[in-house]
Image (cartoon, rainbow, N blue to C red):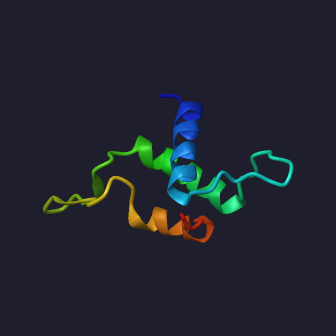
Amino acid sequence: MTDAELKTFYKNWIKDYCNNDFLDDEGNENLPAGVELVLDKLVDFHKQDLNVASEKIADLSVSYFQDQIPTRIKQMLDPYKKMKW
């Protein structure tokens, strides 16, 4: 996938996750800077090995993510979440 395709995919995921379409008063999409930052982090994250959280070369220690998207990235989206009714 290209970076543009990844951004589109993750933008849609963020909208679903936050229950927020990020539309301004005129109905135009307006992503806050924090959401743009998360979007860039997700694209970078996708380019890495999705399961490896950290590696240590000496004595070869590898830890893996428990979730597909790290909790620290999801926490960055908390201020933008809308409640579902």
Could you tell me which quadrant the C terminus lies in?
bottom right
- Taking 26 as reference, is 32 above or below it? below
Residue with the most extreme left position: 59
- Taking 50 as reference, is 9 above or below it? above
> Which residue: 55% across, 31% down?
5
- Viewer-closest of 79 and 46: 79
- Viewer-closest of 32 and 57: 32
> Which residue: 58% across, 65% down?
81
Q: Is residue 44 left or right of residue 7?
A: left
> Which residue: 71% across, 59% down?
33
Res 20 → quadrant: bottom right
Res 47 → quadrant: top left
Residue 54 appears anywhere in the view: no
User: Residue 8 location, x and y as percent?
Assistant: 58, 37
Res 48 → quadrant: top left
- Taking 9 as reference, is 69 above or below it? below
- Viewer-closest of 51 and 16: 16
- Taking 31 as reference, is 56 above or below it? below
Residue with the most extreme front position: 85
